[in-house]
Amino acid sequence: MFQQIIALLVIAFFLARIFRQRKNNQVSRTEFLFWLVFWFLAAMIIVFIKKIDILVAGLGFSAAGIDVILYLTVAALFYMIFRLRIKLEKIDREITKIVREIAIKK
Amino acid sequence: MNIDTKIFCIIPSYNEQDRIKKTILDVKKIIKNIVVIDDGSSDKIYERAKETGVTVLRHVINRGQGAALQTGNKFAYDNGAEIAVHFDADGQFLANEIPRLLKPLLRNECDISLGSRFIEGASKMPWTKKYILFPIARLVNYVLLGVKLTDPQSGFRALNRKAMENIVIEQDGSAHCSEILYKANINKLKIKEAPMTVIYNEYGQSLFKGKGRKKGGIQIIKDLLLAKIMQ
């Protein structure tokens, strides 16, 4: 119970931060919505952690609910890194095009 | 196509100030139109190349050999080239082998003529390259790209106008060798191999590193896999 309260406080801190950033126009509307949904889901997981334990046990996982969520998070992070790598490659190609144009036009 | 065909020699170069002049002068005996691409070098290669009177294009930052070749290809194509010859700046290739490379193109027998170190009097090369690196390269090219040639990593090649038009090099690093062959394959361009000699120096490419950006065998495989995913 104590751990859940701490986790919710941390989430509340990040939520307050993202609201403040939105108010100061430091993040776009889409980004704001993404983080809002993200932290809301995180809060839901923490509030209903016992129910998730029962759910994952029912799905046949031997680990506790929080462990399964951790595995999924790692998988999501891998995916995000992969997307980032592709995005970087595309930016890299664009830079090359600019460098080429400069070289030929000079 | 005849011998008067407009031929351009493209020489990508990165920090090769000590060798560039000799390379240019050797090539100049064979080909009039030479385009040197200074790929963001930190040495005096630009000035040295300029002294020879050839066209020198400068990348403001280093982008890699593939990027430099595409810059040269684009310049040659835009200036009406019928054939573009790719030639290394580091003195590993022999300029007097260019006519032999050009022969099948001038006879309209193919769209790309590719120098090979493995046919007719193969070059003397380090055993690590001969027995480890190149067999791996051949396998990777065959598995990933469906290309079956004796020397897929050869940088000594000549492309006709049709090939220049169909092959836009997007691989900035050394993976451009495989990319060219892959694009030739999907565009149904005809490739012929011609024997060539390579003089190996200490600046060659190994499994893990090479001179300039995006070099080395492992990097090539990574780039090719990424390109395959991005398709």
Image (cartoon, rainbow, N blue to C red):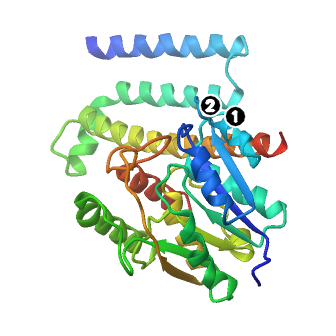
* Residue identifier under label 1: B47
- Percent from the top left, x then y, of residue B168? 67, 62
Q: Residue furthest left?
A: A62
- Foreground of the two, B111 or B165: B111
Residue wearing tag 2: B44
* Residues flagged by tags 1 and 2 on a common chain: yes
- A96 displayed left or right of A37: right
The residue positioned 27% from the left and 11% from the top of the image is: A2
Residue B27 in the image: state x and y as whole percent: 63, 59
Which residue appears at 59% of the width and 70% of the height? B98
Query: The residue marked by circle 2 belongs to what chain?
Result: B
Q: CA distance from mark 1 to mark 2?
A: 6 Å
Residue B203's spot in the image, x, y percent? 40, 45
Whether residue B189 is visible: no
From the viewer's perspective, tell me whether residue A104 is left or right of residue B140: right
Picture layout, residue B79 above or below residue B18: below
